[in-house]
Amino acid sequence: MQKYGVNELRKMFLEFFEGKGHLAMKSFSLVPHNDKSLLLINSGMAPLKPYFTGAEVPPRRRVTTCQKCIRTGDIENVGKTARHGTFFEMLGNFSFGDYFKREAIHWSWEFLTEVVGLDPNRLYPSVYQEDDEAFKIWNEEIGIAPERIFRFGKEDNFWEHGAGPCGPCSEIYYDRGEKYGCGKPGCTVGCECDRYMEVWNNVFTQFENDGEGHYTELVQKNIDTGMGLERLAVVVQDVDSIFDVDTLCTLRNKVCELAHVEYQKDDAKDVSIRLITDHIRSATFMISDGIMPTNEGRGYVLRRLIRRAARHGRLLGIEGKFLAILSNTVIEGSKDGYPELEEKKDFIFQVLTKEEEQFNKTIDQGLRILEELETEMKEKNETELSGENAFKLYDTYGFPLDLTKEILEEKGYTIDEDGFKSAMEEQRNKARTAREVTNYMGADATVYDQIDAEVTTEFVGYDRLVHESKVTVLTTEEELVDALTEDQKGTIFVEETPFYATMGGQEGDTGVITCNGAEFVVEDTIKLRGGKVGHVGKLTKGMIKTGDVVTLSVNAKERANTCKNHSATHLLQKALKTVLGAHVEQKGSLVTPDRLRFDFAHFQAMTAEEMERVEAIVNEEIAENLPVETQIMSIEDAKKSGAMALFGEKYGDSVRVVSMGDFSRELCGGTHVPNTGVITTFKIVSEAGVAAGVRRIEALTGDGVFHYYKEVEKKLNEVAGALKTTPAEVLEKISHLQAEMKALHSENESLKAKMAQDAVGDVMEQVKEIKGVKFLAVAVEDVDMNGLRDLGDQMKEKIGEGVVVLASVNGGKVNLLAMATDSALKAGAHAGNLVKGMAAVVGGGGGGRPNMAQAGGKNPEKVPEALEKAAEILEDQIK
């Protein structure tokens, strides 16, 4: 048997099913589309759910994919075993109401035995115990002896996920030989050991589960098959585990090279080697699909993977930042199947490096917090760290429990692991209750789910704002209806519309739909699955029925302003790349008639100079009156032409390219101005951070800029009026006022000092002598701490050598000050201890140096007692 590589096996599988009439589709993004039931795509079938349910019409009824997937349910075991991983590729062939069991079983057998060349005698199928049809196909048509076909129960061979489509499945196991077995008598298919490996799973979706355990036969039966690419490679290459197949082995060896260690020489090190190998693969693919490290959702999954990898790098003794180096090995090994990795290479490296740097700072901070917690435990004679504190380290500083445990065990401490688990569970419950109610598709259940999947809408509004078309569907907020009447809220669907639906950051059009005296005010235009466009709003007069031919009129002024703002985002993106660098990637945008918002990848705040340059470049291109042209071309030609594609976006075979002279070229389905001169002018009003590594610019164009300056002018006039001057002389007036305030402040301070002195009266009369040291203790009214310090210095000068103690009640609180000269210090005086004793009397605290100290308190009535206490303390201090 030939030992094919991972990239070869992927190609062989897709080409085999293309030969069986399947459409080979590219892997979908790891980010689920319109599916809130999943954080990340975790199976080949997940992104195809709309085709299985009939919510969308598939591009072909036979489809084959190699889907990148992430599962983190067993993340704690990754590295500890050779079989657990978070990233994998799932090979699949799918039938949407076309072929069924016979073809699926025959083709799986043909591919494994004839194409890949696996020994048929080492392959064992399993079927659901009640699926006689599948058993018969394996036995009578494929020719497998009955004793080699295993019947298993629901747990193993029936696929279902709550309510929805479900059905039996048939798995194919490969006998890897005795060397992988447990050696126990009776070891066979279904044993927990590594000898019999499941390589293929045919799911026969033939039933509908109502969620109560009642099954009905589906009209459209589907085939959903899956085969882990890495698992197949393990079998074909006859290696121990997924970490030994060609692409992962290269990556694993790179980890060893950076750490200067050998694999399979030390169990603890092997755990770290495997963990880093797996996690860097997942992180690389996630970032290539536009996921950024954050503290929630899929961003948190990514952050956790990166931090675990970085931490295990430290454990292996890898010096410096290393994740980007390993990511490069991932890209080199997988770019054949996933060219987007190569395209996003620089960006992937930048995100990884930034996160690694951040974690290196955080881990040191976390270690310091852990030291403080150790000290606390020592003081309380405790030997167990509370679950709450262990979870705080995990949640705030990214410390996995095993890291905290490891560090504490070395010092003889343990962790309340149950407490940690309950803190973790509490957080999970909060997250669970915060989740929205979704339908089987993982989207919010809405009235639109009831619309026929065949209904679609064509957008015709690039070159017109008024159009006639036929109404296909009408809905209220709760149900499909045949007509909408006066004052009803609802949604209108037509065959062709000039209304642009909210998409790609551009807000949907508003306007009116009219028909025979009826008028429907469109408040929003939305895009739904299957290319449907919904006009959401309210019927203000008359009635509109299904089948009516209506006139759709877009609000021309709002569309014109939206176009200006949208075209400006294209100029802005190119200007940002020019000023800040090629790493700038669009991370989101919002285009409305009033303003534009543009989110982009950049790792620090923009300087005022950078913003000025960006603004100047955009305005220069507006003044150039560049023609704005659109072309429809293939995705390959678009990329060759240098068109910028949106991050993580899935494009069809044909794309729309919008060019603005030779300055900007982007893939875009939105509406634009005919030439840049129409934008008139552009103004950035704010720039701020919105997430790790993501900045946001808010800006205005055209009338929005003029309105902005009108508002600024209005405020300036109001300021000038308040200052009793003209706008031209505002600055000069402010300078005069500042100088006046400075002089008044100085005068005020002098008066306060004089008042304080006057309040003290004749100092020398109040000086006492304690054991030969002069002692002055005075109470003054309404003097703050700064005033007390100035007064203290003056008193010290007057008495020459000795100790000065001052107390003042200011704003209901007590301020205390003590000062001691050099000779008093030699005699044993200590201002810090003196003031500390006084503070205890007035219900406060404080202290300081031997020569000067201050304190506060909250009991003003105890001031005389505190001054007496000062004399007692000084007497004890002097030797």
Image: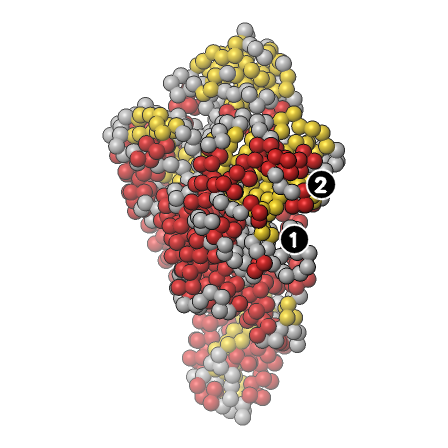
Position in image of residue 213 (x %, y %): 74, 36
Residue at 40 percent across and 29 percent down: it is 653
Position in image of residue 699 (x %, y %): 39, 36
Residue beneath disc 2? 129
Q: Amino acid at mark 1?
A: Thr
| 232 vs 359, nearest the viewer | 232
Position in image of residue 151 (x %, y %): 69, 43
Residue beneath disc 1? 188
Residue at 56 percent across and 85 percent down: it is 874
Q: Residues within 10 Å of mark 2 (few under 14, many from 20)?
A: some
| 301 vs 787, nearest the viewer | 301
Q: Quick one: SS at disc 2?
A: loop
Horizontal side of 96 relative to 160 (left or right) equals left
Q: Earlier in the sequence, mark 2 or mark 1?
A: 2
| 853 vs 91, nearest the viewer | 91
Residue at 49 percent across and 31 percent down: it is 20
**Res 131 quadrant in image:** top right
Q: Residue 848, relative to residue 304: is it above or below?
A: below
Horizontal side of 66 relative to 437 (left or right) equals left
**Res 720 quadrant in image:** top left
Position in image of residue 585 (x %, y %): 38, 42
Q: How many marks?
A: 2
Q: Residues within 10 Å of mark 1 (few under 14, many from 20)?
A: some
Please identify the quadrant where the C terminus is shown. Answer: bottom right
Disc 2 vs disc 1: Cβ atoms closer than 8 Å?
A: no
